[in-house]
Image (cartoon, rainbow, N blue to C red):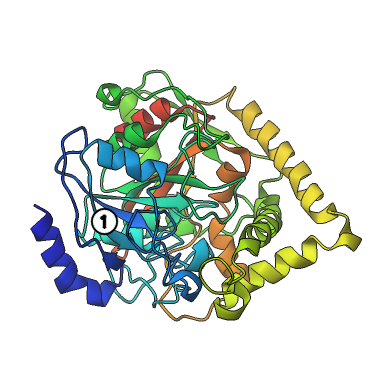
Amino acid sequence: MIKQYLDKIKKDNPKINAILQVNPNPIEGTGKLSGKVFGIKACINVKGLNASCASRVLEDYTSPYDAEVVSRIKKEGGAIIGMCNMDEFASGSSGETSAFGPTKNPGDNSLIPGGSSSGSAAAVGAGFCDMALGTDTGGSIRNPASFCGLVGLKPSYGSVSRYGLIDLSMSLDQIAPIAKTVSDVALLFSVIQGKDEKDSISVENKKINFKEIGKIPKGITVGLLDLEGLNVDKKILEVVEGKIKEKADKNGWKIKKIKINNLDLAVSIYYPLVYVEFFSGTRKLDGRRYGGKIEDLAGPEVLRRILGGSEITKAEHLGRYYNSALKVKKMLDEEFSKKFKEVDCIVSPTVPRLPWKIGEKISVEEAYAADTLTCPSNLVGNCAISIPAGKIDGVPVGMQIICDKFEEQKLLQIAKSVE
C-alpha cells in the first residue's frame, strides 16, 4: 500500500513540489486509521523528520518528538508518509512563499494551490496520501481545499491540541484535516480532537459520532451570507448559491439571507493580531539554540509580518492597535452568536476569487483579501468547513459552511448532505 504512494511521489512530486521530505520509515499499524497514509504540514513536529516550516531558518531542525496530533494518528495505525510544503512559517495564502519553491496546484500546475497549507492540499489532490494535516490561522486549510477541489476543516478553537505546532498566531491557529471526502475529514478529526494536558487551551469538547455523519439533519435553517461590498466574484457566488439552494430544496431546509455587521473589518483586524503574535512567537528564533536567526534568513512576507509586529508593539503605541483589534474581534463574536440563534449554519463562498497563476504579480492587499470570508471564523473561534461546490472553466470552487462553536457534528452532517 505505502509503496504505491512512494512510487507516485517519486514520479509526480518533482513537478508539484508538495512533499519536502519523505519519511524513510513509514510504519503502518492497527486501529481506526489502519491502511491510511498521511502527509503532515512542515510546521507540525514528527519525531525524526524535518519541521522546517518551509524556511531556511529551520531547514536543519530535526523534530525530537511527535506533536500530540501525530501521536494520536500513529496510535490509531496511520502511516506518516512525509512532510508537506507550505508558505514559509504559514505566512501566505498562495503556497508561493516557501523557501524551497512554490507548491503547484495538482489540477493545473500553472495555478497556485492556495495556502498556507499548500503542500498538504496538493499532496492529497495529487494522490500522494489519503489525508493530510494542515493548520488554519485565517483560512490556511479552507483556502487550499477550495482551490484544489478538496474538503478542509477548521475546527472550533481549542478542540484540537496544538502541542508540537510551530505557531503563526497562538490565539487563532488550529491543526486540522484536509481530505477528498467529508467522511475522511470526520474520521481524522474524531481521532485528533479532544483535551490534551500539554495544551492548556484545549478542551474536552463534544466527541463527534462518526457513524451519524451520514444522517441528513432535518428542519434546519441555512443562513446565506449577504456579501454586499465585499468584492466577491459573481460567478463564484452563482455556483455556491445554486448548489446550496438545490440541496436545501431536496432536504427540506429553509434559506434565510443574513448580514453580519462589521464583517468588512475582519481582514483589517486579523492582520494586526497575526503580526503581533507572530513577532512575539519568533523571538525564540535568534540563532542561538537551534536554527538560524529569522531576520537574517527569512523571505519578504515573513519579514513584513515581523516588522509589522515590531512596529505595532512599540512602547509609544501602548498596544492601542492590538487592543482596538481585540475590541472589534469581540463585536464580531457577539454578532455571530446572535446570528446562530436564528440559523443553524452560515454559507458563503470559501475564497472570493479563483486561484491566480504562479508568479502572477498581485498586490499585498489583493493577496490578503483572499482571507476575507475565512478569517472571521478564526477570529471568533467557530467551526467551519470548505467543500467542493462546482467548477468555473474547470477550476474548482469551494463552498464554506460555518457553525457555532463546538458544533462540529452538525457541521459535518450538513457538509456531508451537501456533498
Q: Which residue is mark 1?
A: 124
Q: Residue 286, position in %: x, y?
A: 62, 69
Q: Residue 28, position in %: x, y?
A: 16, 45
Asked if residue 55 lies left or right of residue 31, the reply is: right
Asked if residue 347 lies left or right of residue 4, the reply is: right
Which element type, helix, strand or loop, lies under badge 1? helix
Q: Residues within 10 Å of mark 1 (few under 14, many from 20)?
A: many
Amino acid at circle 1? Val
Q: Residue at x 53, y 49 (%)?
A: 374
Given residues 359 and 237, the one toward you in this image is 359
Can you tell which quarter of the image residue 400 is in?
A: top left
Q: Residue at x 36, y 72 (%)?
A: 111
Given residues 115 and 336, the one toward you in this image is 115
Establish if 360 lies above or below 52. Answer: below
Given residues 409 and 394, the one toward you in this image is 409
Q: Residue at x 37, y 31 (%)?
A: 414
Asked if residue 14 lies left or right of residue 272, the reply is: left
Establish if 25 lies above or below 92. Answer: above
Q: Residue at x 28, y 26 (%)?
A: 210
Determine the residue located farthest toward the top in the rendered image.
219
Asked if residue 226 can be seen in this view, the reply is no
Asked if residue 51 lies left or right of residue 7, the reply is: right
Screen quadrant of the C terminus = top left
How many numbered circles does the render carry?
1
